[in-house]
Image (tube, rainbow, N blue to C red):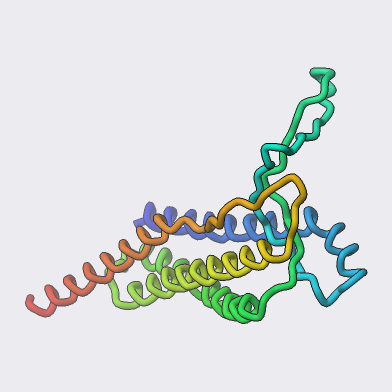
Amino acid sequence: MKRFRILGILAILVIVGDFAISFTAGWQEERDSFLAGSKSARAETPALYTPEGIPVEVRPLETTILDSLRNSKMNENLPYKIDKVSVAIVPSTWSNIVFCFVGFVALAILAGIYCLIRVLISISKRNVFTHENVVRMRVFTYSLLAFSILNALMEWLNYIEVVKQVSLPGYEIKGFSMSEDWLSLMVIVLFTEIFAVGVKMKEEQDLTI
């Protein structure tokens, strides 16, 4: 029993720590990489720019002459190319609408993380196969799935606007690709529903005894 409690506490610490580190690192990266350009752009036409950069994958054209950077250790210039840039765009109306829904779903994810922590606490107490844990797991799983779907939709809408509005001399914008790991999400949904079926079978078995 002590082993279950220790594992549950460790899992809670990992989840909370990973969430805090990921959020902090992502916020600092976005702020540092785009702050200077965003300030200068907004100073000219502040109403036209989004509050953060839209990442876009690009590839150089065959006719593009690649620049070079100085390698002090090798004492020579080495060519480099740009694979990804962040650009400011005029967001579409649909993108703004989806962004509002993403904000609400983000709050649901916080509730989902809380539910997941409650599940781990319940497991540490060896109280695993309960209807409450099924509800908690579904809140976590489907809030995460809803957030991923809305985030992918917003990425697609922003990509359309980037293609319409942005011109990158010497480069072309790559095709749209989603950042979400859909396979992992589907596995999480599958295991959540398997867990729900297992709890239901256990309840039916307890009633027949």
Q: Position of residue 10 (x, y in %)?
A: 49, 54
Image height check: is 52 above or below 1? below
The answer to which of 15 and 107 lies nearer the viewer is 107
Query: Residue at left 53%, top 72%?
Result: 150
Left or right of residue 68, residue 207 in this image: left
Q: How many marks?
A: 0
Is residue 72 at least partly visible in the picture? yes
Quadrant occupied by the N terminus: bottom left
Q: Quadrant of residue 72?
A: top right
Q: Position of residue 131 (x, y in %)?
A: 30, 77
Quadrant occupied by the C terminus: bottom left
Is residue 28 at least partly visible in the picture? no
Q: Quadrant of residue 203?
A: bottom left
Image height check: is 144 above or below 57? below
The residue lying furthest to the top in this view is: 74
Q: Position of residue 198 (x, y in %)?
A: 22, 67
The residue lying furthest to the left in this view is: 208
Left or right of residue 152, residue 71 in this image: right
Query: Residue at left 90%, top 63%?
Result: 40
Query: Residue at left 56%, top 68%?
Result: 151
Q: Position of residue 164 (x, y in %)?
A: 68, 65
The residue lying furthest to the front in this view is: 63
Query: Residue at left 60%, top 69%?
Result: 157
The answer to which of 25 and 199 lies nearer the viewer is 25
